[in-house]
């Protein structure tokens, strides 16, 4: 059963030590690039020997309120909290960032980047993102933007990206993604030794840990899971509600939906969240060049914020169905944050597509405040009852 | 599965602790033998206990006679007297199915929320949608309106039937509508027309929920608001459906569903005991 893995304890210890470690590295002259969103190619940051930190937290209404002084309340709570984090400047990773990199995938986050530069005087570099990755014009624009982004990073680092360094960073991040993908398979297994919540914790530890140290911890975790496999038990999952989590971001610190589902005895077995598994999938770098990196990111499943009108060929829907199947989920909980319009708008069409496959779907629309906690809990509980009832009838 | 009448005393109870009313229904086999509706207490545990005891008294029974109790409603979590808790969504579905087996769609408007529920032929929930977190378009909303009009809540429906037209309302937000109604009254609008407008605004909001889950005949209207004839008429018009005539007070549907589920759980437990023996 989950909850007893040594490597998870080590990852938590590494996280505790990380702010101090970054402070030391900065005093030795290393520079930090904090990045936000989905399409920033970390390969380029690492190839310049800069320290990449993926920024952003959730679940803190106080910071949301603080952020709302600078950004409209018609932005989602994640974005408002992000602005609140910069306003407060007490988060060690926000404070440590010498340069903030933002990709213009989600336009609310792009706006947050503007606010960070304008009000909080942090240097910000924007990576332009086309509204469509599928058109030749969109692809060409993105390649150009990645090239420009690389130049800005080179100026900041005071050096040039070499093929050797890029080869190394591509291999490092490729190995990390592959290990995370393997861990996702472990968490979905019968009688899993690691839970989805722990897996998400591991993924999000990678936002800030030193990437080489992180890879070594991931390998250690996989070895530990392999060693303990012999004690694995097969469980009867008829009473189990295996839930796949989709929709808006669930960043570090946001425990609301996950906590409610777990409290109800549901088991989350996978996700396609851009704060979870999504960025780990499908990055195939054919050649270690800047153009090669751009093409690899173009090849990924597009982020939900990018419009895609043709539902039948929407890769996000196909990816969702594949992952539901891969993790043997019984149902999908689709989490949407208020004012996270891209995901909210796609809720109903996603429901229609999944219902054609007989997959139950529940949208939970919420924020970080606790005022709707019981209402969300009732919906989630009724959905878990529906799923369990269905499972028992199918036996 | 053992015959339900042969399980213990064959007595099953459901308790629905809502935000405004606490309801309890007692079944002996398939027959409703006791029922009660009381105002909800500040302490939901005590309110639930009281409703259960009153329903049992109505049935001429005591706690010792009850084989299984299911609690539901927002106060279900504080129900030490219950053997099991189930959400009101599942209970309203089961209750509607108990009364009207052909019902496939349920509208439930309670004290602080409204729900659209689709069920299968067994009364199992297939899909559902609920309103957002505020009390717009719920029983609480109508309660506030009855205070504005100085008319008892139970008479709002009848009054709306005297309307010559429904005045369009710009919102279902309790606070905004209250000020809008006060302005309309100050302008000398007919109160019946305003109340009819309020009912139509709520009904249209319910229609939005059904856009997400779909409508399939027959349709049943449960919850305290279903007792409002004007509301029922507005729902029928907005959804273009005929709502089934309730066989009992529709506010009791959740408690009845809880009692019906208590009967099913007791039967399952009895079957498990036989298998284990």
Image (cartoon, rainbow, N blue to C red):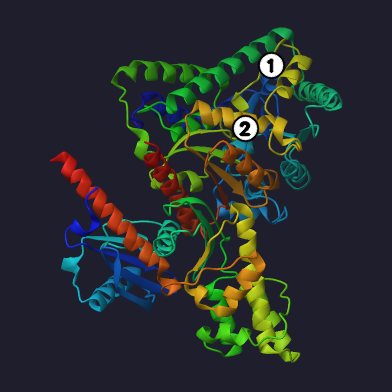
At mark 2, the secondary structure is strand
Horizontal side, residue A159 vs residue B63: left or right: right
Q: Is residue B66 above or below residue A162?
A: below
Q: Chain of mark 2?
A: A
- Give the quadrant of residue A241: top left
Circle 2/circle 1 CB separation < 8 Å: no
Residue pictured at 73% horizontal, 80% vertical = B167
Q: Are marks 2 and 1 on the same chain?
A: yes
Mark 1 lies on residue: A47
Crowdedness near tag 2: few (<14), some (14–19) or many (≥20) residues, C-alpha within 10 Å: many
Horizontal side, residue A133 vs residue B113: left or right: right
Crowdedness near tag 1: few (<14), some (14–19) or many (≥20) residues, C-alpha within 10 Å: many
Q: Is residue A98 above or below residue B23?
A: above
- Give the quadrant of residue B74: bottom left
Q: Is residue A257 above or below residue A189?
A: below
Q: Is residue A8 above or below residue A349?
A: above
Image quadrant occupied by the C terminus of chain A = top left
- Residue reaching furthest top? A164
Tell me the number on the disc at residue A54: 2
Decide which of B74, A387 is in the foreground and name it.
A387
Examine the rendering and report whether any part of residue B69 can be seen.
yes
- Residue reaching furthest right? A137
- Give the quadrant of residue B47: bottom left
């Amino acid at each position: 059963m989950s909850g007893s893995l040594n490597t998870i304890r080590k990852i938590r210890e590494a996280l505790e030590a990380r702010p101090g470690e970054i402070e030391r590295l900065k005093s030795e002259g290393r520079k930090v690039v904090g990045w936000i969103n989905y399409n920033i190619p970390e390969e380029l940051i690492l190839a310049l020997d800069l320290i990449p930190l993926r920024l952003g937290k959730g679940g803190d209404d106080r910071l949301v309120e603080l952020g709302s002084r600078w950004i409209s309340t018609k932005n989602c709570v994640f974005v408002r909290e992000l602005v609140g984090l910069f306003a407060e400047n007490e988060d060690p990773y926000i404070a440590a960032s010498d340069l903030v990199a933002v990709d213009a995938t989600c336009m609310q986050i792009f706006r947050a980047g503007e606010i960070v530069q304008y009000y909080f005087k942090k240097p910000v570099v924007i990576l332009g993102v086309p509204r469509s990755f599928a058109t030749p014009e969109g692809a060409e624009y993105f390649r150009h933007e990645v090239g420009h982004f690389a130049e800005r990073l080179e100026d900041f680092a005071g050096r040039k990206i070499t093929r050797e360094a890029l080869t190394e960073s591509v291999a490092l991040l490729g190995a990390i993604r592959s290990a995370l993908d393997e861990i996702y398979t472990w968490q979905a297994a019968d009688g899993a030794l690691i839970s989805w919540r722990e897996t998400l914790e591991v993924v999000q530890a990678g936002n800030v840990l030193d990437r080489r140290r992180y890879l070594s911890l991931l390998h250690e975790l996989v070895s530990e899971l392999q060693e303990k496999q012999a004690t694995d038990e097969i469980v009867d999952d008829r009473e189990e509600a295996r839930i796949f989590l989709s929709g808006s971001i669930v960043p570090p610190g946001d425990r609301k939906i996950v906590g409610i589902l777990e409290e109800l005895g549901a088991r989350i077995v996978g996700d396609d969240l851009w704060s979870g598994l999504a960025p780990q999938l499908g990055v195939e770098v054919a050649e270690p060049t800047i153009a090669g990196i751009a093409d690899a990111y173009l090849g990924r499943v597009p982020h939900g914020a990018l419009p895609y009108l043709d539902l039948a060929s929407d890769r996000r829907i196909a990816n969702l169905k594949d992952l539901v199947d891969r993790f043997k989920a019984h149902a999908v909980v689709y989490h949407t944050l208020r004012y996270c319009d891209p995901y909210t708008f796609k809720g109903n069409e996603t429901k229609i597509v999944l219902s054609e496959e007989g997959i139950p779907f529940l949208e939970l629309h919420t924020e970080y405040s606790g005022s709707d906690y019981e209402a969300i809990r009732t919906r989630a509980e009724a959905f878990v009852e529906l799923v369990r009832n269905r499972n028992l009838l199918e036996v | 599965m053992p015959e339900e009448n042969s399980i213990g005393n064959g007595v099953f109870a459901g308790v629905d602790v809502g935000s405004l009313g606490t309801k309890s229904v007692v079944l002996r086999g398939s027959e409703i033998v006791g029922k009660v509706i009381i105002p909800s207490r500040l302490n939901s545990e005590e309110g639930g206990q009281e409703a259960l005891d009153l329903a049992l008294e109505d049935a001429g029974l005591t706690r010792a006679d009850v084989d299984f109790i299911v609690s539901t409603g927002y106060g279900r979590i504080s129900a030490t007297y219950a053997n099991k808790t189930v959400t009101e969504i599942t209970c309203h579905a089961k209750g509607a199915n108990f009364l009207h087996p052909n019902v496939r769609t349920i509208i439930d408007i309670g004290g602080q929320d409204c729900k659209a529920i689709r069920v299968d032929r067994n009364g199992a929930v297939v899909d559902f949608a609920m309103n957002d977190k505020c009390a717009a378009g719920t029983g609480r909303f109508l309660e506030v309106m009855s205070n504005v009009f100085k008319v008892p809540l139970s008479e709002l429906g009848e009054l709306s039937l005297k309307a010559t037209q429904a005045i369009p309302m710009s919102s279902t937000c309790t606070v905004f509508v209250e000020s809008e109604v006060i302005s309309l009254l100050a302008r000398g609008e007919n109160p019946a027309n305003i109340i009819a407008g309020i009912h139509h605004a709520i009904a249209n909001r319910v229609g939005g929920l059904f856009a997400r889950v779909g409508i399939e005949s027959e349709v049943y209207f449960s919850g305290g608001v279903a007792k409002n004839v004007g509301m029922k008429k507005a729902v029928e018009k907005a959804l273009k459906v005929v709502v089934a005539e309730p066989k009992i007070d529709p506010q009791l549907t959740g408690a009845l569903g809880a009692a019906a589920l208590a009967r099913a759980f007791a039967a399952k437990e009895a079957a498990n005991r036989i298998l284990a023996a």
